[in-house]
Image (spheres, grey):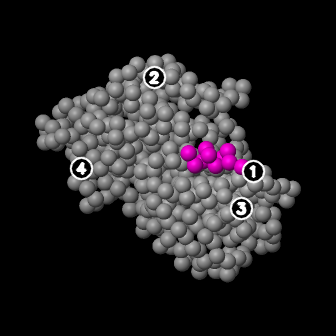
Amino acid sequence: MDRHVHDRRRFLALTGALSAAPLLSACGAGFGGGGQSEGDGSAADDVTGAFDWKREKGTTVKALLNKHPYTDALIADLTSFTDKTGIEVTYDVFPEDNYFDKLTVDLSSGRASYDVFMLGAYMVWQYGPPGWLEDLGPWMRNASATAAEWDRADFFPNLLQAGQWSLKAGAPLGRGGQYALPWGWETNVVAYNTEVFRKLGLKPAKSFEELRELAAVIKKRAPGAGFDGMYGIAVRGSRSWATIHPGFMTMYARNGLRDFTVEGGKLSPAMNSPRAVAFTEDWAAMVKEGGPPSWTSYTWYQCSSDLGARKAGMLFDADTAAYFQAVEGASPASGKIAFHPGPKGPDGSLATNMWIWSLGMNARSRRKSAGWLFLQWATGKEHLRRAALTHHHIDPVRKSVSQDPGYRNKMRHLPGFLETFETVVDRTRIQFTPQAQFFDATTSWAAALQEIYGGKSARSVLDGLAGDLREKVR
């Protein structure tokens, strides 16, 4: 939940500068895609014989972690890993306002201070092409290196595919090397205040047009029904990539729209197509008619807090943003928040964008065998079940955990949560086109959205955005 505090421009500056720096030529020497040694194949090939959890007993693995509820669950369970393997884990935890700075500098330097680390799937598009990430595919395929109970087929396939890429801009996910493993994720749906819906006689929207109408109705009528200062819908609006990826990109994708098209192997911006312009105008109008007064400063935190404080009638964002307000005693609205997949697209689409926290391995690590055992354990059924039941891994990456009676009993008190999860889980994937300028492009897109909200012509603004991005992404 801390991730949207980070200034992505700092991340961009680091990755952009370091990608061009001479030091990368040195640290990348001898490495092909995914950090494999030229002519030697993967280090996974060195692991032979029967699988053994104790094969690296006495080794120490160092992890770099972001401050997050998933991290809390992992640290609380580390003794289980050490007992199982004899491997010690040391770790550093940083808040996200400097986490990715730390990770980027370490990976680019070639020092390999950390063997394993957290990363978002979008970061694979930055870290993969320079050869900073180990391709985990050979490890997964080696029965000597991977325990049978790890069970690759137990992952929701769309989540596993989010970290699999050919390293070619514009190429679809799900092909090529496996550069990250799914660990925890968030789907983007609508959460709403059941009390105001009941008092005003409202029902969740089935279409985007209905959602826009609902937002305006709540903003107009809720104060008279005892909800002082309540507006209709909370969505992000700050000048950040994070404004684009949750509700906006979800509804954009459900309308069959793309951020880029690929023509002749080259990326071409598509956010200025006639249908994309019309949708963006409607989104900005929805925010003006039913959103918060200071929308252009809104991050996930303000959106989540307003839902919990009974200031927002609806939230279109990460399900976790609503979850932490909905749990008993967490906020004035707890016990009165329900979940819904949100509006369908014109053709019935429930395409949904996601954020996914993943785990990866440093291509320069000298302890890859031990690191792979750690990644197996951290993404395995045993740990993730405990994390779901006793901590806040509320969107399981594994099918078995999502069907676990203990997990389902824990989540059943949240109206609509399990039903919503099951409705969108197979439709949720990264809706963006993989490319290294992702953060720059989406931050510029958020700035364009603010201009349209402020009254500028959507056609003119989006044409300008597309023109600026066309050469950058090529």
Residue 15 covered by magenta stretch: yes
Q: Are marks 2 and 1 in contact (CB under 8 Å)?
A: no
Q: Are marks 1 and 3 in contact (CB under 8 Å)?
A: no
Judge depth for marks 4 and 1 and give the one in front.
Answer: 1
Q: Are marks 3 and 4 in contact (CB under 8 Å)?
A: no
Left/right of residue 217 with respect to residue 33 in the rendered view: left
Residue 194 covered by magenta stretch: no
- Bounds of the magenta segment: 13-22
Q: Position of residue 447 (x, y in %)?
A: 43, 33
Task: Tell me the chief SS of the magenta region.
Answer: helix
How far is disc 2 from disc 1 in space, using C-alphas? 39 Å
- State the quadrant of the N terminus: bottom left
Question: What's the mark number on residue 461?
Answer: 2
Element on which disc 3 rests:
loop
Question: What's the mark number on residue 364?
Answer: 3
How far is disc 2 from disc 3 in space, using C-alphas? 44 Å
Q: Which amino acid type corresponds to the residue marked 1 in the rendered image? A: Ser
